[in-house]
Image (tube, rainbow, N blue to C red):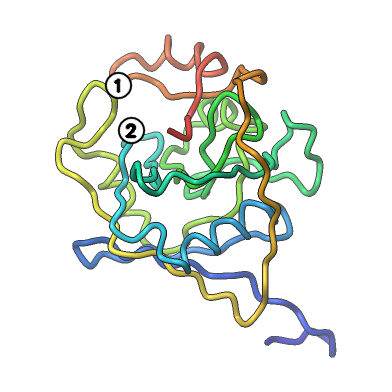
């Protein structure tokens, strides 16, 4: 573990996504800013939850989303939303190209297993995401792969025609532990609005409607 002026500096966890094609995406997690999201992601990844799942929602020039559970894997819990709209104020980050974020439903505390990676650099679109989703990491190697995934042919629901399968996701924690708190799933979507996505070919109108929709966990 590195030291600065004699003081031990904890290394952030590092995640590795290996696609079925052998392509590799590497990134860093940010436990200081989103400890619940980081702890949950580490737990799921290192237990093998994401193995064999896919990037199931792909929107060119916006996001690539993964982590949707199979029917037999549905999680019995959610985590607290670590973002401004949910009155979370602890070291908030802003969305940028490569940000790793928790997807969720309409309720602010409905995130569970799904995550998305931002592939846009458009300031208007990034601003629409800010405050609405927990940012808990960032990709630092392999964004060309994520861009390619987000650009594949999809159906009208943004589901890839050809599955973009994940072989495995693992996180190196450098022998540190990252506890988190499981909370019951919400019974309603009481906290809407949130941000969904723009429709291909309809940038302006969808941008205006983003706050009314959601990048959902489901």
Checking the image for residue 175, the label placed there is none
Asked where in the image residue 150 lies, by quadrant, the reply is top left
Please give the label number shown on residue 200. Answer: 1
Q: Position of residue 109 (x, y in %)?
A: 65, 35
Q: Earlier in the sequence, mark 2 or mark 1?
A: 2
Q: Quadrant of the C terminus?
A: top left
Q: Which residue is mark 2?
A: 59
Q: Nearer the viewer, residue 49 or 95?
A: 49
Q: Nearer the viewer, residue 204 or 129?
A: 129
Q: Residue at x 60, y 42 (%)?
A: 78
Bin the neighbour count of mark 1 within 10 Å (Cα to Cα): few under 14, some 14-19, many 20 and up. few
Element type at marker 2? strand
* Residue that lies at the very extreme toward the left in this rendered image: 162
Residue 6, position in %: x, y?
Answer: 84, 90
- Residue 43 location (% of width, % of height): 55, 63
> Left or right: where does residue 67 sit relative to residue 135?
left
Q: Residues within 10 Å of mark 2 (few under 14, many from 20)?
A: many
Residue drawn at the location 57% of the way across and 31% of the way down: 129
> In terms of image quadrants, where is residue 184?
top right
The image shows residue 11, relative to residue 213, as above or below, that is: below
Horizontally, residue 47 falls left or right of residue 39, namely: left
Q: Nearer the viewer, residue 122 or 187?
A: 187
Q: Are marks 2 and 1 in contact (CB under 8 Å)?
A: yes
Q: Is residue 124 left or right of residue 81?
A: left
In the depicted structure, whether residue 161 falls above or below residue 174: above
């Amino acid at each position: 573990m590195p030291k600065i002026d004699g003081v031990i500096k904890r290394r952030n966890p590092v995640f590795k996504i290996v696609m079925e094609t052998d392509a590799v995406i590497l990134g860093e997690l940010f436990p200081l800013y989103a400890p619940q999201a980081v702890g949950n992601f580490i737990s799921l990844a290192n237990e093998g939850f994401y193995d064999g799942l896919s990037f199931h929602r792909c929107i060119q020039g916006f996001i690539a989303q993964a982590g949707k559970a199979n029917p037999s894997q549905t999680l019995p819990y959610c985590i607290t939303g670590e973002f401004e709209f949910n009155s979370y104020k602890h070291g908030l980050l802003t969305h940028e190209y490569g940000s790793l974020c928790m997807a969720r439903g309409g309720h602010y505390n409905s995130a569970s297993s799904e995550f998305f990676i931002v592939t846009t650099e458009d300031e208007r679109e990034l601003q629409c995401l800010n405050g609405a989703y927990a940012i808990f990491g960032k990709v630092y190697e392999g964004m060309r792969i994520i861009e390619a995934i987000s650009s594949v042919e999809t159906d009208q629901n943004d589901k890839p025609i050809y599955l973009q399968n994940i072989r495995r996701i693992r996180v190196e924690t450098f022998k540190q532990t990252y506890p988190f708190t499981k909370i019951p799933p919400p019974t309603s979507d009481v906290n809407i609005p949130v941000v969904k996505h723009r429709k291909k070919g309809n940038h302006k109108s969808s941008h205006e409607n983003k706050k009314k929709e959601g990048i959902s966990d489901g």
